[in-house]
């Protein structure tokens, strides 16, 4: 099994659960965060000993709320990762505005984190409240300024559109705030009402489809006019600031995920650590691997996943890598409709096609 170049570390602690969030998150368990980092280090050591950690091109510390971990313990984690980093490696971390301050950010920067992804979601108080977000717009603005002051030259902001109650004016205000803040990278996803979340349980209606389409076009146009490249369906970057970790994932590269709920895909095999904190901590404390489930990946799974991920990218996908679509005859039809570029070697969507990417994917492929 060849060693991986991309590592994800899941730091699951949160002070409360946001109404839309279906991630593997632990609320009210902060007392166990040091124990968790010990377990994570033990899992890292197990993977190192198994020869699965190669020269790392990218590392991503995601959550949860990584900024709830103690900065000194995060620095110790970074110490253990440093010997594996390739020169110029991208080391990203997610940060929530209410849980971090300038000195903590400066400590993270010194510890080797060189890319920060700030979970802002919106700058409008009523929309933050609709999402049950803990931070205020003022805290978000302050965090952006602190991150720059701490020396972060690779700064990303996460936003959501399609929030219940969001108007076209709200969107304009969020766009204007983003452009004023001037991050290097923006992730701007449409709200997904995931089963089991508070928003879904409350019967929140989905955003109107036409309004959603208008909002998406406005976001793409507004960010492109300001010099951001629309390099992935929901991701935008100034030249050279594309997220290398996400690009590896969208290119279906092998990666290792450590921590509760984390997924790994290595050498055609996929496994997922169980989500329960207790089971994870107990296994690692006993010197065992975390409880895991394995998912076999056959050639069709790989081909369908490559199409799903590759069509999201502006650069499209090489056919030699992705394999044929389930319905090859649809290529000519979509191409004639001006939605897709297709030659012998590659397929990519036209600008218009990118706005209806999901419908195109389902024209080309069968998904269960
Ligand atoms: C792993 S999450 C959490 C990161 C961080 N804890 C935070 O709250 O900002 C990363 C990003 O995914 C996006 N996201 C999470 N759940 C979503 C949902 N249901 N619909 C749309 N975007 C979502 C949000 O923009 C979020 O910042
Ligand atoms: S802070 Fe982030 S990870 Fe935690 S509950 Fe909210 S969205 Fe989910």
Image (cartoon, rainbow, N blue to C red):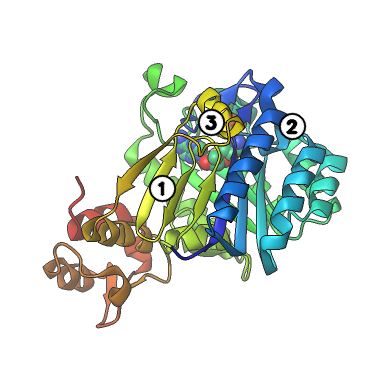
Which residue is painted at 36% across and 31% down in the image?
Answer: 206
Do the CB atoms of the residues marked 3 and 2 lie less than 8 Å apart? no
Residue 268 lies left or right of residue 146; in this view the side is: left
Image position of 57 with respect to 341: above or below: above
Bin the neighbour count of mark 2 within 10 Å (Cα to Cα): few under 14, some 14-19, many 20 and up: some
Residue 99 — which label? Answer: 2
Is residue 313 shown left or right of residue 46?
A: left
Mark 3 within 8 Å of ligand 2, using the beta carbon: no
The kind of secondary structure element at disc 3 is helix
Query: Which residue is more in the foreground, 87 or 291?
Result: 291
Q: Residues within 10 Å of mark 3 (few under 14, many from 20)?
A: some
Disc 1: which residue:
214
Asked which secondary structure carries label 2, the reply is helix
Q: Residues within 10 Å of mark 1 (few under 14, many from 20)?
A: few
Spot occupied by residue 286 in the image (x, y as percentages of width and height): 58, 31
Q: Are marks 1 and 2 in contact (CB under 8 Å)?
A: no
**Front label number (1 vs 2):** 2
Q: CA distance from mark 3 to mark 1?
A: 49 Å
CA gap, disc 3 to disc 2?
29 Å
């Amino acid at each position: 099994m060849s060693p991986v170049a991309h590592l994800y570390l899941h730091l699951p602690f949160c002070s409360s659960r946001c109404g839309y969030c279906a991630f593997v998150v632990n609320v009210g368990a902060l007392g166990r965060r040091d124990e968790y980092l010990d377990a994570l280090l033990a899992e890292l050591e197990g993977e190192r000993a198994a020869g699965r950690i190669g020269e790392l091109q990218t590392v991503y510390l995601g959550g949860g709320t990584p900024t709830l971990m103690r900065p000194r313990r995060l620095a110790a984690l970074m110490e253990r990762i440093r010997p594996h980093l390739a020169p110029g490696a991208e080391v990203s971390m997610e940060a929530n505005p209410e849980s971090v301050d300038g000195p903590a950010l400066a400590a993270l920067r010194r510890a080797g984190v060189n890319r920060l992804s700030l979970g802002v979601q919106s700058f409008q108080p009523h929309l933050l409240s609709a999402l049950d977000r803990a931070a205020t717009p003022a805290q978000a603005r302050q965090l952006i300024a602190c991150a720059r002051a701490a020396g972060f030259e690779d700064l990303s902001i996460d936003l959501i559109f399609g929030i219940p109650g969001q108007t076209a004016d709200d969107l304009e205000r969020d766009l204007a705030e983003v452009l004023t803040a001037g991050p290097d990278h923006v992730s701007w996803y449409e709200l997904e009402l995931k089963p089991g979340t508070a928003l879904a349980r409350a019967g929140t209606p989905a955003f109107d489809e036409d309004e959603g389409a208008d909002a998406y076009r406005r976001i793409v146009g507004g960010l492109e006019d300001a010099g951001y490249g629309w390099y992935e369906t929901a991701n935008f970057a100034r030249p050279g600031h594309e997220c290398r970790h996400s690009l590896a994932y969208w290119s279906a590269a092998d990666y290792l995920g450590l921590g509760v709920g984390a997924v790994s895909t290595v050498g055609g095999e996929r496994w997922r650590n169980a989500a329960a904190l207790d089971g994870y901590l107990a296994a690692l404390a006993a010197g065992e691997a975390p409880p895991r489930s394995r998912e076999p990946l056959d050639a069709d799974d790989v081909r369908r996943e490559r199409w799903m991920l590759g069509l999201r990218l502006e650069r499209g996908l090489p056919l030699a890598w992705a394999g044929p679509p389930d319905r090859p005859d649809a290529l000519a039809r979509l191409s004639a409709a001006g939605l897709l570029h297709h030659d012998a070697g590659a397929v990519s969507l036209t600008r218009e096609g990118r706005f209806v990417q999901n419908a195109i994917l389902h024209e080309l492929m069968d998904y269960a």
